[in-house]
Image (spheres, rainbow, N blue to C red):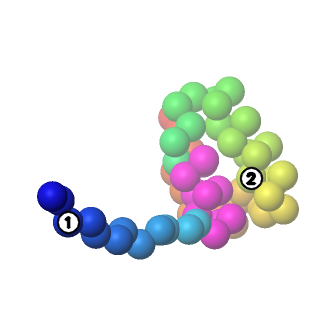
Amino acid sequence: MRSEIAMPVESYTDERKSEFLLNNAVDADDYALAVKEVRKLGLCPWKISHKCPA
């Protein structure tokens, strides 16, 4: 019989989700889609800490 353990559930703020979207863009088209999704969340993409794809 195995013991069960409880793992905490991590929830992300809209800002953190936006950071993931923007940082994971692989090219200009993908980045444009990420910017659009961030705006849908009601946030300004330029105020989210991230690196633009080259």
Residue at the front extreme, as displayed: 1
Q: Is residue 39 above or below residue 43?
A: above
User: Which residue: 56% across, 37% down?
Assistant: 25
The quadrant in which residue 5 appears is: bottom left
Magenta stretch containing residue 21, yes or no?
Answer: yes
Q: Which mark is residue 38?
A: 2
Q: Residue at x 47, y 68 (%)?
A: 9
Q: Main secondary structure of the magenta part?
A: helix
Q: How many marks?
A: 2
**Residue 32: where, in percent of width, then height?**
72, 36
- Inspect the magenta stretch and tell me whether residue 34 lies in it: no
Q: Helix or strand or loop: what does disc 2 sit on? A: helix
The front one of 53 and 15 is: 15
Where residue 11 sits, quadrant-wise, is bottom right
Q: Is residue 34 left or right of residue 11?
A: right
45 horizontally vs 28: left or right:
right
Residue labelled with disc 1: 3
Give the quarter of the figure containing the N terminus: bottom left
Amino acid type assigned to the residue bearing label 2 in the image: Val
Residue drawn at the location 64% of the way across and 31% of the way down? 30
Which disc is residue 44 wearing? Answer: none
Pointer 2: residues within 10 angstroms few (<14), some, or many (20+)? many
Name the spot of residue 40 as percent of width and height, x first: 84, 52
**Start-end of magenta stretch:** 13-22
Q: Amino acid at mark 1?
A: Ser
Disc on the earlier residue, 1 or 2: 1
The image shows residue 13, relative to residue 51, as above or below, that is below
**Front one among 45 and 18:** 18
